[in-house]
Image (cartoon, rainbow, N blue to C red):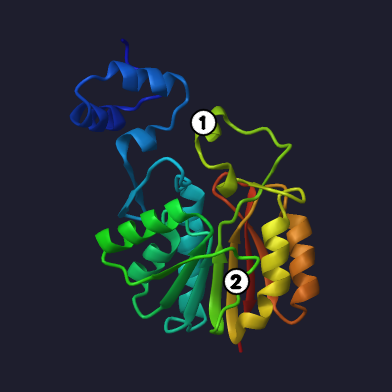
Amino acid sequence: MKKPSKLNDRDYYLLKNKYKDLEPVFKLIEEDYPIQYLIGDVDFYGYPMIVKEGVLIPRFETEELVSRTIKLIKENNLEHGNVLDIGTGTGCIPITLKKEVNSLIITSVDISNKAIGLAKKNARANNADVTFIKCDIFKYKPINKYNVIISNPPYVDRNEEVGPEIKYEPELAIFADDNGLKFYKHIIKNMKKYLDDDFIMAFEIGYKQGDVLKKLAKEEFKDATVKVEKDLAGFDRYLFIINSR
């Protein structure tokens, strides 16, 4: 069977070394099955992250969220702060934050047993000290105050058209009710009582959600700086709420 056109040389080399028979692998790729699941890991911010079915595959846009958040943490002298990561998936966000700013104290939550199990495995593989908790964020009551709350929550509207490869990834980690805004509304409105005086809230958002989320954030945090920033493709992709003295 001919090599699929969507398979680059690097991934072909990795698959060739992993599988004796590439024909069924190529067939899956032609059916839009994610190549990352077949390879079994991805590079995220220079750190290897194991990926498997049932857990969302990390994207480049999320690397950029982490990069910008690290910059804000350093600019606002929050390197020794408490961090809450909501919706951990593979654990790529909290693990990278911990590796890049080791003095952070990080707790990460997810409702999925598969995600928590994989995130713990990735943390061990990367020697990153992160506390993972399996819970529903709508019921979570932290015992700490946080300096940073970061999240790449499910944000795709259930009526929105998505790429064919998405069908193999967990719906739970992709789609959200209320035009994709359900998680943002809850976190912005209900988690603010768990924020310290100096804080950063950092979110990856859908490209159509910038205006409505900026308005919501300004209503809830009247004295904070609220910014919507674009990704490298020029789309609204990040929301930051910053309160620093």
- Quadrant of the image containing the N terminus: top left
Q: What residue is drawn where x is 70% and y is 79%?
A: 224
Q: Is residue 9 above or below residue 95?
A: above
| Front in this rendered view, residue 92 or 64 | 92
Q: Secondary structure at mark 1?
A: helix
Task: Check disc 1 and report the residue beneath it.
Answer: 165
What number is the disc on residue 109? none
Count residues near mark 1 (Cα–Cα under 10 Å), then give few for <14, some for 14-19, many for 20+.
few
x then y, percent, for residue 198: 59, 85
Name which quarter of the figure residue 219 lies in.
bottom right
Locate residue 125 relative to residue 87 in the image: left or right. Answer: left
- Quadrant of the image containing the C terminus: bottom right
Locate residue 110 relative to residue 177 in the image: left or right. Answer: left
Comparing labels 1 and 2, the label whose residue is closer to the camera: 2
Q: Earlier in the sequence, mark 1 or mark 2?
A: 2
Q: What residue is drawn where x is 54% and y is 65%?
A: 135
Locate residue 164 relative to residue 218 in the image: left or right. Answer: left
Q: Secondary structure at mark 2?
A: loop
| Front in this rendered view, residue 47 or 185 | 185
Task: Check disc 2 and report the residue beneath it.
Answer: 140
- Taking the view exactly as shown, the residue that stands out farthest to the top is 1
